[in-house]
Image: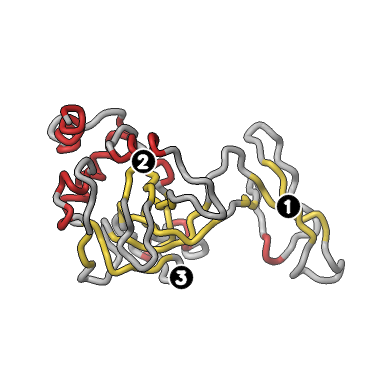
Amino acid sequence: MSFPEDSLQSFAGADKWWIKNESKKLCRGALIFAFAPHVDLTPHYIESVGRTDATKHDSAVIQVSPLSINQPLKKIPQLPIAAMTLFEGEVWAAYRAKKRPCLVFSVGGIPVDKELTRRKSPRATAPTFLAAPYYGIGQNGKRSGYNPLFIEGVRHCEYSQFHWEKELPFKDGEESLLRLDHLQPLGAHYNSYKLSDYMLSPYAMSLLDDLLYWFVRGGLPENSDLLLYKEFIKET
């Protein structure tokens, strides 16, 4: 795969950017597919407003409404729905989600001994991993595309929350933006994700680690090669 001369991939060595995931396991730098939720400025929630049949507990009439942090939560309905169990202080949040390519940043923490977990609530320590989703850039019938000047700025690492990819390495892979500000937990279960055949090389991953450091800490490490790249862009 060839990259523009002014891209981070070319600066790092384009032939060493994407490599085969020989382990065929979930790992840092792995390119996976998962249903990633859209993060809206205003969240929404789902509430049951009645049953389709007063004698049945497995169906309901629902309503989707905007959710404000300042609004008082409604009391749990007296006619609960079997598939929509709620506890005090909880709501069913509503998000649009789409199957997207994602980049794995962490495969999770240290496993917890089962003897130390709460047996009645295994999800309290259920393992997750952290991944950031890619979004397609090109214009098509469903999206208007991005301003080319903005994309050029992303390619030149002017924004800590975005990273540019010319073409993701799988069939029908397209020009994309990686959004570090959408880094999110995903369940470490085989139904939650699917591996691709590719991963970032260790060096490429170290560059994106520095980008994430910049996004989280507000500046790059003093010895980061991203500083060299940004200086290269400034000079050329």
Q: CA distance from mark 3 to mark 2?
A: 28 Å
Earlier along the polypeptide chain: callout 1 or callout 2?
Answer: 1
Secondary element under disc 1, as helix, strand or loop, is: strand
**Viewer-nearest of discs 3 and 2:** 2
- The amino acid type of the residue labelled 3 equals Asn
Which of 220 and 110 lies nearest the eye of the viewer?
A: 220
CA neighbours of label 3 inside 10 A, class few (<14), some (14 to 19), many (20+)? few
- Residue at position x 33%, y 68% in the image: 196
Q: CA distance from mark 1 to mark 3?
A: 26 Å
CA neighbours of label 2 inside 10 A, class few (<14), some (14 to 19), many (20+)? many
Secondary element under disc 3, as helix, strand or loop, is: loop
Q: Quadrant of the C terminus?
A: top left
Residue 75 visible at all: yes
User: Residue 40: image x %, image y %?
Assistant: 57, 42
Q: Quadrant of residue 173?
A: bottom left
User: Residue 77: image x %, image y %?
Assistant: 77, 53
| Residue pointed to by mark 2 | 162
Earlier along the polypeptide chain: callout 1 or callout 3?
Answer: 1
User: Residue 27: image x %, image y %?
Assistant: 27, 61
The numbered mark at residue 191 is: 3
The numbered mark at residue 120 is: none
The numbered mark at residue 47 is: 1
Would residue 1 appear left or right of 39 to someone viewing this image? Answer: left
- Residue at position x 30%, y 53% in the image: 106
- The amino acid type of the residue labelled 1 equals Glu
Q: Quadrant of the N terminus?
A: bottom left
